[in-house]
Image: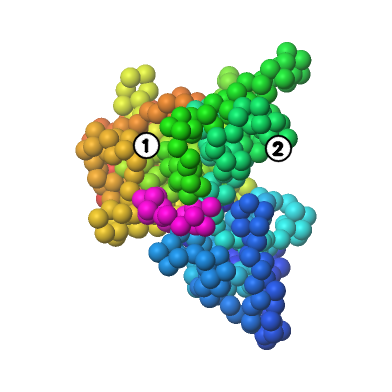
């Protein structure tokens, strides 16, 4: 999970709280060495006075000075506390040392990790892209050092599959990475040698390089697959040199980031969750699928962790949402996403349940993103790509209303490739909206989502109340 929408107060009801108290900063009043980690296996080494009370804002000045980040790009980055179990973007007023002292509380509150894993987990302090920094401003950056920082983070997300992309994208991005490392204009033989020395996984998504198909696929020819990927990478590199001009590093970096901007989840905050798999028969128990929920200034995307593709992508103009707390012991926090769809040709409202201990964070994050959109001058923070603009024009709807429940949302926009919404594969609760009434169609749970009924074997029409319309 990424993004900070909470005040980091430990849950007083949590019996597992072990770091609720903060050590006196007096014990840290002398100089301390601090490492601020960057993407690309590098770090900034600082000597900090009074580490126990230093704020993110104060650290930021020192890091920007060390990295020579110009004032015009200072908002492009933020400080993060990251570990394999949790990632949080800090606010300028936060004191990293004190948040670290509360780390175990945060893990108990927002993850499902075991006590053993929690006791051994330790976060590192990172300097990386600010989730709330608009892509439109990023496109104006020309400083090569800043572009390099953004590039290293974007490349990491491409390589690890956090940003799912199609072959034409990862081949192009891999070719640009190859050009950054080796320069442009190299002949094919030298490039092939370089690729084999550094390995394909240095340039292409790891899951693409590894592939699938099991033993049979391996026996049929792993070498031929590798050769095909090499050819794709070489083709991506060749396209950079078609014009014959030698590109500057800054121009290649900008081209890489512009290509990443075509992915709707670029710059998102990522959260962990699960969704129900569709039942495969009357007697088969419903199982769950692990998903990443990515949220940005533009919308919400639900991605299959294993298959590395989008299951559902929604602009804020296309969704409503809610967050429900556990009602009984053993229940889950749930983030509800409501969007328009169809069932056998009938327009319906679809509800997707996302089970996650981070549902509270996700709900707050969505609300905060929408607030930023509504107050930004000229819609700068709500900048969307060309396709998104066409989608909103087609729907003719304004997405500034909270929860989107003040009016009808535009129909879900279908996209192609791995970015395509696979609504047919989702186990959703479907409702029919008939003006003043909302009635359930093919119910999948024991109570109406809108009325929170606790009993009653039959579904009846539910009158839309004023509270419901306000969200």
Is 198 left, or right, of 342 in this rendering?
right
* The furthest residue to the top: 220
Please name the residue that numbered disc 2 is placed on: 198
Q: Secondary structure at mark 1?
A: strand
- Name the mark nearer the viewer: 1 or 2: 2
Expressed as whole percent of the image width and height from the top left, the position of residue 171 reads: 54, 30
Looking at the image, is 280 positioned above or below residue 334? above
Closer to the camera in the image, 226 or 291: 226
Q: Which residues are magenta?
A: 130-148
Residue positioned 31% across, 42% down in the render: 317
Residue contact between numbered discs 1 and 2, judged by CB atoms under 8 Å:
no
Is 217 left, or right, of 56 in this rendering?
right
Residue positioned 62% across, 27% down in the render: 188
Expressed as whole percent of the image width and height from the top left, the position of residue 348 reads: 34, 29
Whether residue 67 is in magenta: the answer is no
**Colouring scheme applied when the structure was drawn:** rainbow
User: Marks 1/2: CA distance?
Assistant: 45 Å
Instruction: Find residue 226 and report its image quarter.
Output: top right
Residue 469: image tag: none
Residue positioned 72% across, 20% down in the render: 222
Q: Quick check: can you spot residue 242?
A: yes
Please name the residue that numbered disc 1 is placed on: 339
Instruction: Find residue 374 and report its image quarter.
Output: bottom left
């Amino acid at each position: 999970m990424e993004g900070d929408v909470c005040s980091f107060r430990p849950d007083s009801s949590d019996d597992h709280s072990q770091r609720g108290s903060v050590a006196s900063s007096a014990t840290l009043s002398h100089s301390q060495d601090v490492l601020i980690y960057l993407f690309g296996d590098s770090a900034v080494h600082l000597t900090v006075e009074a580490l126990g009370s230093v704020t993110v804002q104060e650290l930021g000045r020192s890091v920007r000075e060390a990295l020579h980040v110009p004032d015009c790009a200072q908002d492009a980055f933020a400080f993060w506390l990251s570990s394999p179990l949790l990632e949080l973007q800090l606010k300028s007023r936060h004191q990293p040392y004190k948040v670290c002292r509360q780390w175990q509380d945060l893990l108990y509150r927002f993850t499902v990790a075991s006590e053993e894993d929690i006791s051994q987990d330790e976060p590192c302090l990172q300097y990386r892209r600010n989730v709330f920094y608009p892509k439109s401003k990023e496109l104006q950056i020309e400083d090569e050092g800043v572009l390099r920082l953004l590039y290293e983070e974007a490349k990491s997300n491409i390589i690890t599959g956090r940003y799912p992309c199609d072959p034409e994208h990862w081949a192009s991005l891999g070719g640009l990475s190859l050009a950054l490392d080796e320069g442009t204009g190299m002949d094919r033989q030298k490039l092939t040698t370089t690729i084999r020395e550094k390995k394909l996984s240095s340039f292409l998504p790891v899951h693409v390089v590894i592939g699938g198909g099991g033993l049979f696929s391996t026996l049929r020819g792993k070498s031929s697959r590798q050769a095909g990927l090499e050819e794709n990478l070489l083709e991506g590199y060749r396209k950079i040199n078609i014009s014959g001009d030698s590109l500057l590093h800054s121009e290649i970096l900008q081209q890489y980031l512009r290509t990443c901007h075509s992915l709707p989840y670029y710059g998102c905050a990522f959260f962990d969750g699960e969704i129900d798999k569709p039942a495969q028969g009357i007697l088969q128990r419903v199982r769950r699928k692990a998903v990443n929920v990515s949220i940005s200034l533009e919308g919400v995307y639900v991605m299959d962790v294993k298959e590395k593709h989008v299951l559902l992508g929604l602009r804020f103009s296309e969704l409503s949402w809610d967050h429900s707390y556990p009602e009984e012991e053993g229940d889950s926090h749930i983030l509800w996403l409501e969007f328009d769809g169809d069932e056998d040709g009938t327009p319906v409202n679809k509800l997707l349940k996302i089970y996650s201990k981070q549902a509270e964070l996700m709900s707050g994050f969505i609300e905060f993103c929408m607030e930023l959109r509504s107050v930004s001058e000229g819609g700068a923070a709500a900048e969307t790509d060309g396709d998104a603009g066409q989608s909103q024009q087609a729907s003719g709807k304004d997405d500034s209303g909270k929860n989107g429940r003040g009016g009808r949302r535009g129909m879900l926009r279908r996209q192609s490739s791995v970015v395509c919404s696979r609504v047919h594969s989702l186990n959703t609760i479907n409702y029919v909206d008939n003006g003043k009434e909302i009635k359930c169609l093919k119910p999948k749970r024991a109570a109406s989502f809108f009325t929170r009924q606790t009993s009653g074997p039959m579904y009846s029409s539910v009158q839309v109340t004023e509270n419901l319309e306000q969200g």
